[in-house]
Image: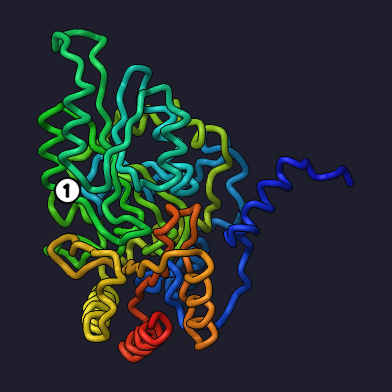
Amino acid sequence: MKNFPKSLQQKLQHRKVHNALRSLPESNSLIDFASNDYIGFAKSETIFEQTHQLLVNQNIKVNGATGSRLLSGNHTLFQQTEDFIAQFHQTETALIFNSGYDANIGFFSSVPQRNDVILYDELCHASIRDGIQMSNAKSFKFQHNDLEDLEKLLQRHSIQLPASSSQLPAFYIVTESVFSMDGDCPNLEELVQISERYNGYLVIDEAHALGVFGSPETSGGEGVVQSFGLQDKVFARIMTFGKGLGCHGAAILGSAELKNYLVNFARSFIYTTGLSPHSVATILIAYQHLTKEQIALKTLKKNITHFNQEKNRLGLKPLFVYSKPACRQAGSAIQCAIIPGNERVKSIASQLQQKGFDVKPILSPTIPEGQERLRFCLHNYNTEKEITEVLSLLATFVN
């Protein structure tokens, strides 16, 4: 076999030296405080069985899509599922992508045009930043959840041209409704006001909000945007199904014009094989369950409250990133304890795992050096006893 390039060897060695080398973990039977399966849909036997039955009932007995959706892969379940998603999220259309990563790089690489301006939160997900890098638009990051900094950037980059000018650039303002590494959220109501003042196009990734937050008038789970009734104020929402929905894929929500544009210009949609019928059926069944799921969401919110109470009781609150309660509801299902240094945070995570708790360390360079952390993901199936025990162990290990 040909020798591995020295430049790549050096990069791997640099990771080893800094205790930051990634490796694929083995599956385990530890108590889950690591997965994004917030309301247990990934483990649901009911969803699994009903997905199979839906395929049988519709006589869909194929394993794959067989091609791009623009060629042979646009099987009948796609339209049925996209229509259901659009109705659920109170939007004109939905377009399914193979993953949240594909959705973000497809959107940001094709929608913003040359001379347009993208202003994005500095902690936006890698898929958003990768898509922005593929764009011909200008891009600038604003400080995390700092809307004053955002407005300064808007003022600085506004170009005063006649409203009728075809050269007037578009401003795309990009953020997440729940951030995956901090568990916090922006002030969406103020963000909408700023966007409207500058005639901007607001784009919100709701990956970690779907299934967790939602409208108080319904069973919930629609996301943060709908919890504030702002769905008509947002240009595009990216919904990812691999977290709260417990399956795979994603959808971009927006106008019929946006869907038509993406079908024609989003390369990550055009040039890839579509999701299999089984994958799309799982999305549809999971969404149908979300329309009537109340116990799981209530239990999750109860667990979030208990986690916050216990970390305060044990004197751990200073370690944790402040997670502003979203949607006028309980706080986030993502709770992060800052423990600087790759070696130290890996050591404490290992001690928790040895005691039976699957808590993952988040290392630099994934996050900035000095911001290394333990990331606790809470679920409806965690018990209050488990939450108390894992935090009691953490208090022992950090002192």
Few, some or many residues within 10 Å of mark 1 (<14, 14–19, 20+): many
Mark 1: which amino acid? Leu
Q: Is the C terminus in the top left, top right, bottom left or bottom right quadrant?
A: bottom left
Query: Is residue 373 visible in this depiction of the protein?
Result: yes
Residue 239 position, x and y percent, is 35, 50
Residue at the farthest right position? 1
> Foreground: 16 or 298?
16
* Horizontal relation, residue 136 to residue 164: left or right: right
Residue 380 position, x and y percent, is 33, 78
Residue 106 position, x and y percent, is 45, 35
Q: What residue is at 43 percent from the left and 27 percent from the top? A: 135
> Foreground: 27 or 389?
389
Quadrant in the picture for residue 252:
top left
Q: Is residue 50 above or below residue 85?
A: below
Query: Is residue 236 visible in this depiction of the protein?
Result: no
Q: What residue is at 23 percent from the left and 14 percent from the top? A: 168
> Foreground: 104 or 182?
182
Check disc 1 and report its element: helix, strand or loop: helix
Q: What residue is at 42 percent from the left and 22 percent from the top? A: 136
Q: Is residue 107 above or below residue 84?
A: above
Q: Which residue is mark 1?
A: 188
Marks counted in the figure total 1
Q: What residue is at 40 percent from the left and 45 percent from the top? A: 79
Quadrant in the picture for residue 17:
bottom right
Q: How is the image coloured?
A: rainbow
Quadrant in the picture for residue 297:
bottom left
Residue 21 position, x and y percent, is 62, 59
